[in-house]
Amino acid sequence: MCIVKSVGLAARNDVADVRIVQVLLNLNSEAWSGAAMKQLSVDGQIGPNTIDAIRAFETRAMGLPESDGLVTPGDATMARLLAGLPPGPTKDKLGLVMPRAMPQRIDLYYEPLVKGMTRYGIDTPLQIAHFIAQLAHESGSLLYSEELASGSAYEGRTDLGNTEPGDGPRFKGRGLIQLTGRNNYSEYSKFTGIDYVADPARVATDPFACVDVACWFWKDRNIGPLAEADDARAVTKCINGGYNGLDDRLENLVRAKALLGL
């Protein structure tokens, strides 16, 4: 299941779901479009072009005698759309897991993500699915690389190693899975050989560091086995310290699994 609600004629047509169907139709366009037909605009708005494309896909690609112009979660049309995707992680798939992500943000982080996941062994379908699902929530679909709050709430948190005045704001959450606290910045600095304690903002402004720190945290905290066990609650607790945003993380996970053939 890659969409949450129905898409098409007389459907619920949630913007994110419509965008997902539009992208999937474009990725399968060779199977349904005629020579004169152009790819759909991925705008999340249902209209005659998208409905006609659904109908064309069902009759031409699937061989159905007629079409109702409707795609529903888990139906045969969605299964066939997913079956037409290339294997492994791609920019398009990343955008489908995070349908509200801006294309320029996907462009910015895609290469660092591929390199980082390879470097840290986040390379099985279950690990990739859980990692991307968590990262999507933590970063607001790649929109944020730095915690919006000032970080003053972390001031004096000795459990985070914040022992000096100003450590709370200085070492607030940064990276696509937010690194927080002097201790964590120190550990990551020792691992990389780069002094992020002296320049903590770099964790948010350098796209490769922004992704690398998320991959490092995943590996350092041994989250991989929890993902391999498909335990989304345990993965969330490891990353968040609680279960904040669990529903959103689970929705991301459902889409990621569908796109990776799980």
Image (cartoon, helix red, strand yellow):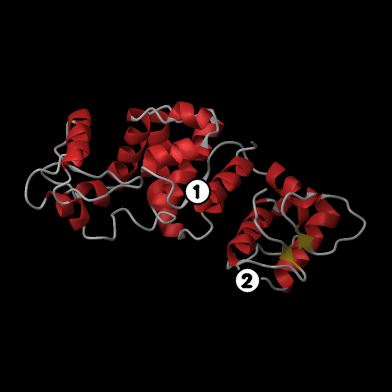
Residue 45: mark = 2
Q: Quadrant of residue 190?
A: top left
Q: Nearer the viewer, residue 192 or 170?
A: 170
Q: Secondary structure at mark 1?
A: helix
Q: Report the label total.
A: 2
In this view of the protein, can residue 219 be seen by the observer?
yes
Looking at the image, residue 53 lies above or below residue 107: below
Q: Where does residue 126 sit, x and y in percent of width and height?
A: 54, 33
Q: In the image, 119: left or right of 60?
A: left
Q: Secondary structure at mark 2?
A: loop
Looking at the image, residue 109 lies above or below residue 52: above
CB contact under 8 Å: marks 2 and 1: no
Q: Which residue is mark 1?
A: 249
Looking at the image, residue 256 lies above or below residue 68: above
In this view of the protein, can residue 92 be seen by the observer?
no
Q: Quadrant of residue 150?
A: bottom left
Amino acid at circle 1: Arg
Q: In the image, 120: left or right of 191?
A: right
Amino acid at circle 2: Gln
Q: In the image, 179: left or right of 259?
A: left
Using the numbered discs, state the Cα–Cα distance from disc 2 to disc 1 in whole angstroms. Answer: 24 Å
Q: Nearer the viewer, residue 76 or 134?
A: 134
At 35% from the left and 45% from the top, the residue drawn is 177
Q: Nearer the viewer, mark 2 or mark 1?
A: 1
Q: Where does residue 2 sit, x and y in percent of width and height?
A: 64, 50
